[in-house]
Amino acid sequence: DIVMTQSPATLSVSPGERVTLSCRASQSLSSYLAWYQHRPGRAPSLLIYGASTRATGIPDRFTGGGSGTEFTLTISSLQSEDSAVYFCQQYDTWPPTFGQGTKVEVK
Amino acid sequence: QVQLVEAGGGVVQPGGSLTLSCAASGFAFSSFGIHWVRQTAGKGLEWVAFIRYDGVNKFYADSVKGRFTISRDNSKNEVHLQMDSLKTEDTAVYHCARGIWIGTPGHWFDPWGQGVQVTVSS
């Protein structure tokens, strides 16, 4: 199975700051990568698919990038409602696999 | 509103059984495959099972193969996950999720249900 590794595990950031999360794959995915946001008490929600395409209704402060084995999710100006765990998922190879997540705390 | 809602979680002894359900609304249910994904604090997210839109093809993670059975009833917009021979390591929050495929090798997931807790403990 493809192993997905996310870093850092936790971030504590002030509102308005820029945040970049990393997701690395154990083998090339082309651009078959999705990002999700999981807020406490809510269902996980899709942010990005195809490595860089925002899902419907996702604010443009969320930007996905990368290809191959290295991917990033950037939040350009952090808002309080962005406090959540963010995780990546590859869909290049069956079975789908996930990173362990990055917890973003807004100070 | 596109929505998935899980039910049926609970506490069960090792070796026991439990059946989860996933009720869908707001979309053409019979046109989409549905996945189960579980989440634990220690192992993170793990894909568990998938059933194709018509129920013909089913796939399972190696960790649950032979113990879990996924099924669907398109007349009721429901998917079920029957879990037998449960182990303590099956303890997790179980989410159902709609699989999205547009000619890609695999699926991404949208939406997800909020999840239901399954605890396997004596």
Image: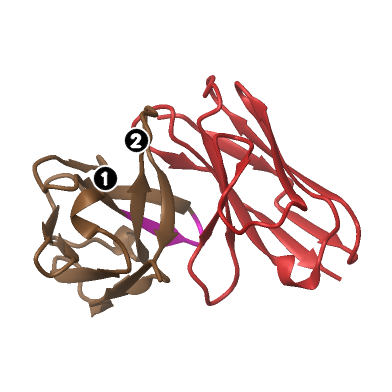
Q: Nearer the viewer, residue A73 or B54?
A: B54
Query: Which residue is identified by label 1?
Result: B63
Q: Residue B114 at x, y = what percent?
A: 42, 71
The circle drawn on residue A95 is: 2
Q: Residue B22 at x, y = what percent?
A: 25, 68
Q: Residue at x 74, y 47 (%)?
A: A8
| Rendered image quadrant of residue B97 | bottom left
| Circle 1 residues within 10 Å: few <14, some 14–19, many ≥20 | few
Query: In the figure, is residue A79 to the left or right of B114?
Result: right
Task: Name the kind of residue labelled 1 in the image.
Answer: Ser
User: Does dot 1 land on a helix, a strand or a loop?
Assistant: loop
Q: Colour of chain B?
A: brown
Q: Is residue A71 magenta?
A: no
Q: Main secondary structure of the magenta part?
A: strand
Label 1 to label 2: alpha-carbon separation: 12 Å
The circle drawn on residue B81 is: none
Query: In the figure, is residue B12 to the left or right of A105?
Result: left
Q: Could you tell me if residue B114 is visible in this image?
A: yes
Chain assignment, label 2: A
User: Does dot 2 land on a helix, a strand or a loop?
Assistant: loop
| Circle 2 residues within 10 Å: few <14, some 14–19, many ≥20 | many
Q: Residue A59 at x, y = what percent?
A: 70, 57
Query: In the figure, is residue A76 to the left or right of B110?
Result: right
Q: Colour of chain A?
A: red
Range of magenta residues: B36-42
Chain assignment, label 1: B
Query: In the figure, is residue A84 to the left or right of A1?
Result: right
Q: Is residue B37 magenta?
A: yes
Q: Nearer the viewer, residue A35 or A6?
A: A35
Task: Name the kind of residue labelled 2 in the image.
Answer: Pro
Q: Residue at x 51, y 62 (%)?
A: A44
**Which quadrant would the C terminus of chain B be assigned to in this image?**
bottom left
